[in-house]
Image (tube, rainbow, N blue to C red):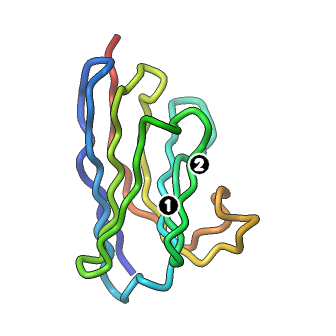
Amino acid sequence: VQLQASGGGLVEAGGSLRLSCAASGRPFSNYAMGWFRQAPGKEREFVSAYRYNGYTYYTDSVKGRFTISRDNAKNTVYLQMNRLKPEDTAVYFCALGRPILSSIRTVEGYGYWGQGTQVTVSS
């Protein structure tokens, strides 16, 4: 399985970006797809996930600003990020796995990871 993340960049505070993550190697409709981020000097943290059954999850700090979606036909998951803040600056990673519900927000819940895409929000 390979995951290819794209869509990062430099944006001013209040702006928007859309991240994409394309999966190849196996159909991913029965998997959860997640987005995590890691800022310099910090641990990788959960951002959002889209479970195989259609349920979506968000960390509190992005609720109402970020939207996760997926296109099973394209094996792609998206993260639409609006009203970006400087504290959103990080490398964003997409992940694929079959986490149990209690692990959906954990790094350990996912077995496959993309290479990361940098998101920088200037103030």
Q: Quadrant of the N terminus?
A: bottom left
Q: Which mark is residue 65?
A: none
Q: Is residue 62 above or below residue 105?
A: above
Q: Amino acid at mark 2?
A: Phe
Q: Residue 72 lies in what quarter of the image?
A: bottom left
Q: Is residue 5 left or right of residue 45?
A: left
Q: How many marks?
A: 2
* Helix, strand or loop under label 2: strand
What is the x, y in percent for residue 101?
Answer: 71, 69
Q: What's the residue type where badge 1 is placed? A: Gly
Residue 34: which disc? 1
Left or right relative to 11: residue 65: right
Quarter holding the C terminus is top left
- Asked if labels 2 and 1 touch by Cβ distance under 8 angstroms, the answer is yes
- Residue 55 lies in what quarter of the image? bottom right
Residue 69 shown left or right of residue 9 in the figure: right
Number of other residues with Cα within 10 Å of mark 1, as a class: few under 14, some 14 to 19, many 20 or more: many
Q: What is the C-alpha distance between the residues marked 1 and 2?
A: 8 Å
Q: Earlier in the sequence, mark 1 or mark 2?
A: 1
Using the image, determine if residue 80 lies above or below residue 56.
Answer: above
Q: Which residue is mark 2?
A: 46
At a point 60% along the width and 43% down the height, the residue shown is: 59
Say which of 40 and 89 sits in front.
89
Mark 1, secondary structure of its residue: strand
The x and y percentages for residue 118 are 33, 39
Q: Residue at x 58, y 69 (%)?
A: 110
Q: Quadrant of residue 22?
A: bottom left
Residue 113 locus on image (x, y percent): 46, 65
Percent coordinates x, y for residue 8 in the rendering = 27, 42
